[in-house]
Amino acid sequence: EDQVTQSPEALRLQEGESSSLNCSYTVSGLRGLFWYRQDPGKGPEFLFTLYSAGEEKEKERLKATLTKKESFLHITAPKPEDSATYLCAVKRDDYKLSFGAGTTVTVRA
Amino acid sequence: DVKVTQSSRYLVKRTGEKVFLECVQDMDHENMFWYRQDPGLGLRLIYFSYDVKMKEKGDIPEGYSVSREKKERFSLILESASTNQTSMYLCASSLLGLDTGELFFGEGSRLTVL
């Protein structure tokens, strides 16, 4: 069965304290891995697409990387406005998306 | 600015009631989706549509139906609401293309069934 597992469930960081979020997946045929950010009371907002192992994407303090079995979202020198839930999703063989449960990041000033 | 609008942010319904959740997008997107989001379970796909009057079952379609009479509008229907359908419902749209994973989401409709 296709599965997407994100860890940790929650992450509390001090402002400027860099860290990484993990998304591991088991799908029969990966057709893309996607990262989203979700603020409380809002819908998810698209961040990145990764298609092949070794690929990296960056946006401001966020950098996403992909291996054959997992993806990492690195947050460098985070600020309080980076506080959000980060969701990972993979596109399966049937072209549907499977989402992980998310990692909730809290950055304290 | 692109927008997906869900008509109701909060609803409270009673068991057995018929519930309509409406979603409108202004981006001329072909694909539209309905997800539910529950703590610890992530987003789960209920139904999606890739064209007017077309619909496909997602991973958890039981107890739901959908309607897409116009390209911009996608409705989720709960024929007889039950307490286990209490959840956050998210509508999304995307351009046509099987490999795209860039979805544009609405702000969600939080449904409570008593």
Image (spheres, coloured by chain):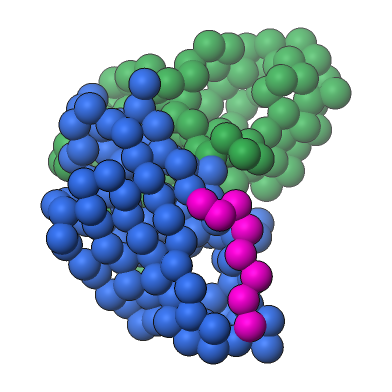
Chain colours: A blue, B green
Indicate whether residue B96 is drawn in magenta.
no
User: Residue at the location (31% across, 49% down)?
Assistant: A70
Nearer to me, A75 or A91? A75
Residue B41: x and y, percent?
A: 57, 35
**Over which residues does the magenta segment extend?**
A7-14
Nearer to me, B81 or A82? A82
Up-down relation of residue B37 to residue A17 (above or below): above
Q: Quadrant of the N terminus of chain B?
A: bottom left
Residue A38: x and y, percent?
A: 53, 59
Q: Is residue B9 left or right of residue B46?
A: right
User: Residue at the location (15% across, 60% down)?
Assistant: A54
Q: Is residue A72 visible?
A: yes
Q: Quadrant of residue A89?
A: top left
Indicate whether residue A9 is drawn in magenta.
yes
Q: Quadrant of the C terminus of chain B?
A: top right
Q: How many marks?
A: 0
Nearer to me, A73 or B52? A73
Q: Is residue A16 left or right of residue A34?
A: right
Nearer to me, B82 or A35? A35
User: Residue at the location (29% across, 21% down)?
Assistant: B54
Up-down relation of residue B11 to residue A56 (above or below): above
Residue B100: x and y, percent?
A: 22, 46
User: Residue at the location (49% across, 31% down)?
Assistant: B44
Q: Is residue A34 left or right of residue B13?
A: left
Up-down relation of residue A42 to residue A81 (above or below): above
Q: Is residue B31 visible?
A: no
Residue A83: x and y, percent?
A: 59, 72
Principal secondary structure, stretch drawn in magenta: strand
